[in-house]
């Protein structure tokens, strides 16, 4: 069926290798930075990811969706307008970030160079998103797969070389870790942009038709603006979450240092291990957005129903065994990072969080492809509000502490997955239990 198995295979294969390398990256960081240093690294990542998110303006999603829906003769014109929008947006964002960066307190605990290194990400991510969106829309997933693999390979190679032959204090080691992360994005940028230029030159040789600039802008903005708003909300919550969790743990009776260490074990060890199989979910998400968009534009509800059925089965068949293995072998797996019984307990208690997250990613692709971005945003708001409330109210209690945080994360994941699933089922006309398919022929 039309979930483009070839694209999924390429992405999943490269993502599997990438996740394996990511495992090595976090093991190197855990051993070089220590518990407290790893906690600091994991605390700054959400803020960096927020900059990445703003820079991308979710153009990879809007472009891939628009490219998939339109005939090839319109692609050249779509890309011209997309590049123009990107140039304007990047210049504005770069100037704003340059002015605001010295006043952002999150970076005060890190090397002074960190805040300026993050600025480099703005043009890099912006133009990478255009190329990535085009390749996704054309279902050229091999190029996306190669770029993902290059990112991780560069990161682990540089970290290994630096930490193998040189010794650094914690502040310098953190700077190198962050600089390497940013450097890996530059490698992806160079690969995708060069490949995109070659493809664009070929595209210029075929007959093309123009679309009205306002039409292109309206279609791109119709996806990019709400998607970026949703991602910004999620990223802001992600940037706040480390401080909320650590504040709750301190309020429950832990010292600030111990709270930072526990957060580092949660995000740097338990989450790293538990999200390892998510490369399949991420691959599905990338392939499904253009596939669902195309089927929805053609009102092919039969294909949409079959895609949903296949995706749910595939996710169940790899997700359940994965979380079972993590639960059973939590001790040996976490000991690869630290000899800590706490990290093993975190991994075991978070099995619902991981399992339902595997469903969330492809379901979110369905919602985006179906044009239900507003619903996706509303679901994220509800799940986050409930999660943060539980962290604050339960995690702060001395008798709960980190257990309250884990309960909040599990609750958020389960709630978000269920809301996504029910909305998709209603939209495409299929029963919740995948029975009694309703053959829709028109929009509701």
Image: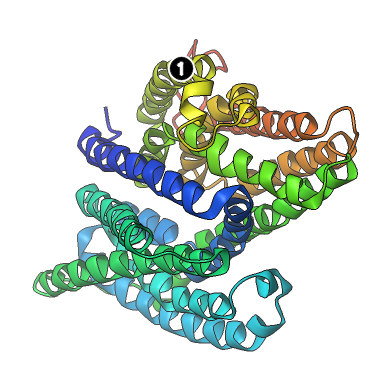
Quarter holding the C terminus is top right
State the residue at coordinates (62%, 39%). Answer: 266
With 444 as the anchor, is 398 left or right in this view? right
Give 400 or 225, whichever is nearer the viewer. Answer: 400
Give 335 or 12, whichever is nearer the viewer. Answer: 335
Q: Is any part of residue 424 visible from this angle?
A: yes
Q: Position of residue 307 (x, y in %)?
A: 37, 28
Quarter holding the N terminus is top left
Q: Which residue is mark 1?
A: 325
Label 1 sits on a secondary structure element that is helix
Q: Quadrant of residue 348?
A: top right
Q: Position of residue 131 (x, y in %)?
A: 30, 66
State the residue at coordinates (33%, 72%). Answer: 211
Decide: few, some or many residues near mark 1? Use Cα within 10 Å; few <14, some 14-19, many ≥20.
few
Residue 332 vertical placement versus 164 (above, below): above
Q: Position of residue 188 (x, y in %)?
A: 30, 64
Give 398 or 351, whichever is nearer the viewer. Answer: 398
Q: Position of residue 214 (x, y in %)?
A: 46, 76
């Amino acid at each position: 069926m039309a979930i483009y198995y070839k694209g999924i295979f390429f992405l999943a294969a490269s993502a599997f290798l990438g996740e394996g390398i990511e495992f090595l990256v976090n093991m190197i960081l855990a051993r070089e930075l220590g518990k407290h240093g790893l906690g600091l690294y994991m605390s700054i990542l959400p803020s960096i990811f927020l900059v990445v998110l703003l820079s991308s303006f979710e153009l990879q999603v809007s472009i891939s969706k628009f490219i998939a829906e339109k005939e090839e003769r319109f692609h050249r014109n779509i890309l011209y307008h997309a590049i123009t929008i990107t140039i304007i947006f990047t210049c504005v964002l770069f100037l704003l970030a340059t002015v605001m960066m010295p006043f952002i307190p999150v970076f005060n605990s890190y090397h002074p160079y960190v805040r300026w290194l993050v600025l480099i990400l703005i043009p890099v991510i912006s133009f990478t998103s255009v190329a990535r969106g085009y390749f996704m829309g054309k279902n050229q997933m091999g190029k996306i797969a190669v770029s993902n693999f290059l990112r991780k390979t560069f990161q682990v190679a540089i970290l290994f070389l630096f930490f193998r032959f040189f010794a650094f204090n914690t502040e310098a080691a953190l700077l190198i870790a962050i600089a390497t992360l940013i450097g890996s994005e530059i490698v992806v940028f160079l690969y995708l942009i060069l490949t995109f230029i070659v493809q664009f030159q070929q595209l210029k040789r075929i007959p093309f038709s123009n679309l009205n600039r306002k039409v292109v802008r309206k279609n791109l903005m119709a996806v990019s603006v709400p998607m970026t708003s949703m991602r910004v909300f999620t990223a802001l919550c992600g940037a706040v979450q480390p401080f909320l969790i650590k504040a709750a743990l301190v309020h429950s009776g832990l010292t600030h240092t111990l709270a930072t260490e526990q957060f580092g074990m949660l995000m740097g060890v338990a989450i790293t291990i538990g999200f390892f199989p998510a490369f399949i979910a991420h691959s599905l998400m990338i392939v499904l957005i253009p596939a669902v968009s195309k089927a929805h534009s053609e009102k092919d509800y039969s294909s949409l129903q079959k895609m949903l059925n296949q995706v749910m089965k595939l996710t169940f068949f790899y997700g359940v065994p994965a979380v079972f293995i993590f639960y059973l072998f939590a001790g040996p797996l976490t000991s690869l990072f630290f000899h800590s019984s706490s990290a093993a307990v975190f991994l075991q208690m978070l099995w619902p969080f991981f399992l339902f997250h595997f469903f969330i990613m492809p379901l979110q692709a369905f919602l985006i492809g179906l044009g239900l971005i507003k619903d996706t945003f509303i679901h994220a708001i509800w799940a986050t509000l409930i999660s943060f409330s539980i962290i604050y109210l339960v995690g702060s209690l001395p008798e709960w502490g980190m257990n309250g945080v884990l309960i909040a994360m599990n609750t958020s994941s389960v709630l978000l997955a269920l809301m996504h699933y029910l909305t998709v089922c209603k939209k495409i006309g299929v029963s919740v239990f995948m029975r009694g398919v309703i053959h829709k022929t028109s929009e509701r």
